[in-house]
Amino acid sequence: MNPTDIAATAAGAAPAADITIWSMFWGAHIVVKIVMVGLLLASVWCWAIIIDKTLLFGRLRRAMDRFEESFWSGNSLEELYGKLSERPTTGMATLFVAAMKEWKRSFQTGASASFMGLQARIEKVLDVSIAREVEKLESNLLVLATVASAGPFVGLFGTVWGIMTSFRSIAASKNTSLAVVAPGIAEALLATAIGLFAAIPALIAYNKMQGDVAKAQARMESFADEFSAILSRQIDQHAANRDRAA
C-alpha cells in the first residue's frame, strides 16, 4: 500500500480494510508486486520441473527393470543388441548398446590385436555413458536448488520493502494506529509467504530427486561393472582362441 493512500485513509473516516490475498496483492507497492509475481512464476516453473522429473524417473525405473529382465533371461547378447540398437534407449540399455558398439567396432576394424586396449576402451565407453545419463537426469535440478535457496530471501526483500513503505506511511499520516499500519505490513508479509511457498516444495523435490539420481547412478554403475566382467571373460576367451590358432 502506498504512503499517500494510507495517509488519505487515516485522515478520514475510512471503512474497515478488506484484508484478502487479492486485495493485499493489488494494494502492495509496485516493487513488492514484482517480487510476488516473480516468485509465483518461479513456483510454476519448479512445479513443471517436478512433474517432468517425476515422470522421467518413473519411466527410467520401468525401463531398467525391463532391461534387467531381458539381459539376465539368458538370451543372446547379439540378439538383445539387435533389438535395442533399433530404437532409442535409456539407462542401462544405453550403456549396453554403447559397449556392444565399441566391441563390434573393434573386431570389425581389426583392432582385436590389442585385447587389453579393448577392455580399457569398453570401460571408458561405459563411464562416459553413465556420465551422460546422469547429466540428463540432473538437468534443471539446479533450478530447484536455486529457488529453494534464494526464494525466501527474495520474499524477505519484498517484505522489507513493504515494511519500509508502511513506516513512510506512518510518517506521512502522523498516525500510529494499528489500522493504518496493519494493511501495509500484511501486504509485505505476503511476499515472504509466497517466497516460502515457492522454496519449500523446491527444496523437498530437489533432495528427493538428488536421491533418485544417486540410486539410478549406483544401479547403472553396478550393471557396468557386471557387464564389463562379462566382456572381460569374452576377451580372455578370444585371446585364448587366438593363441591356440597361432
Image: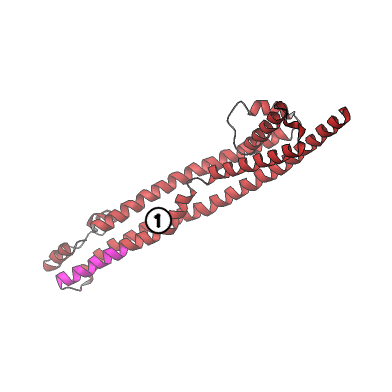
- Report x, y in % for residue 55: 52, 40
- Report x, y in % for residue 227: 72, 39
- CA neighbours of label 1 inside 10 A, class few (<14), some (14 to 19), many (20+): some
Front residue of 78/6: it is 78
Residue farthest along the left direction in this orientation? 12
Q: In this view, does 104 lie above or below 154?
A: above
Q: Quadrant of the N terminus?
A: bottom left
Q: Which colour scheme is used?
A: secondary structure
Q: Name the residue under label 1.
A: 197
- Report x, y in % for residue 172: 15, 69
Front residue of 233/178: it is 233
- Which secondary structure is most common in the magenta stretch? helix
Left or right: 134 with respect to 150? right
Left or right: 201 with respect to 39? right
Q: Quadrant of residue 108?
A: top right
Q: In this view, does 167 lie above or below 120?
A: below
* Magenta highlight range: 159-176
Front residue of 34/78: it is 78
> Residue type at mark 1?
Phe
Q: Is residue 53 magenta?
A: no
- Report x, y in % for residue 114: 76, 35
| Rendered residue at 67%/33% (across/down) | 102
| Residue 49 visible in the displayed image | yes
Q: Quadrant of the C terminus?
A: top right
| Rendered residue at 25%/67% (across/down) | 164
Left or right: 176 with respect to 131? left
Label 1: element kind: helix
| Rendered residue at 86%/32% (across/down) | 243
Q: Quadrant of residue 34?
A: bottom left
Q: Does the magenta stretch include residue 175?
A: yes
| Rendered residue at 16%/62% (across/down) | 5
Q: In which quarter of the image is residue 242?
A: top right
